[in-house]
Amino acid sequence: DATKLSPGRPCDLVFLDPPYGKGLGEIALGSAVAKGWILPGTLIVFEESTTSNPDGFHVETIRKFGGSTITLLTSI
């Protein structure tokens, strides 16, 4: 369960593909930051049905493919 992570080592790249429309991606990101998985500069590939712009992250680019939106974020 990515919303309840254990402490971990920082990652340089994170792929995030939560169930659409439930807000779980933002919760998972918050958990990953809190548990040390994401540090400033980490690149996140976030797939969701809509654009996501969570606090603490910079949107690098947004691409739409049919009903999916891929947002590339970096943590700040």
Image (cartoon, rainbow, N blue to C red):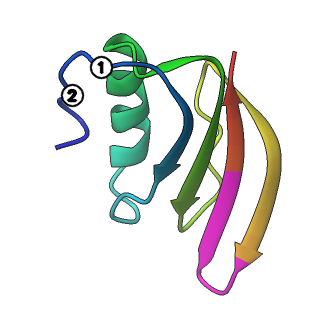
Magenta region: which residues?
A: 65-71
The answer to whether marks 2 and 1 mark residues whose Cβ atoms lie closer than 8 Å is yes
The image shows residue 41 at horizontal and vertical percentages of 70, 21
Image quadrant containing the N terminus: top left
Residue with the mark numbered 2: 5
Instruction: Relative to 64, say whether 8 is above or below.
Output: above
Per the image, the residue denoted by label 1 is 8
- Residue 15's x, y, as percent? 50, 51
Q: Is residue 23 left or right of residue 44?
A: left
Secondary structure type for disc 2: loop
- The prevailing secondary structure element of the residues shown in magenta is strand
Q: Quadrant of residue 39?
A: top right
Q: Secondary structure at mark 1?
A: loop
Is residue 2 depicted above or below 55 in this figure?
A: below
Please rate how many residues cluster around mark 1, counting C-alpha atoms within 10 Å: few if below 14, some from 14 to 19, many from 20.
Answer: few
Q: Is residue 75 magenta?
A: no
Q: Position of residue 33 (x, y in %)?
A: 43, 18
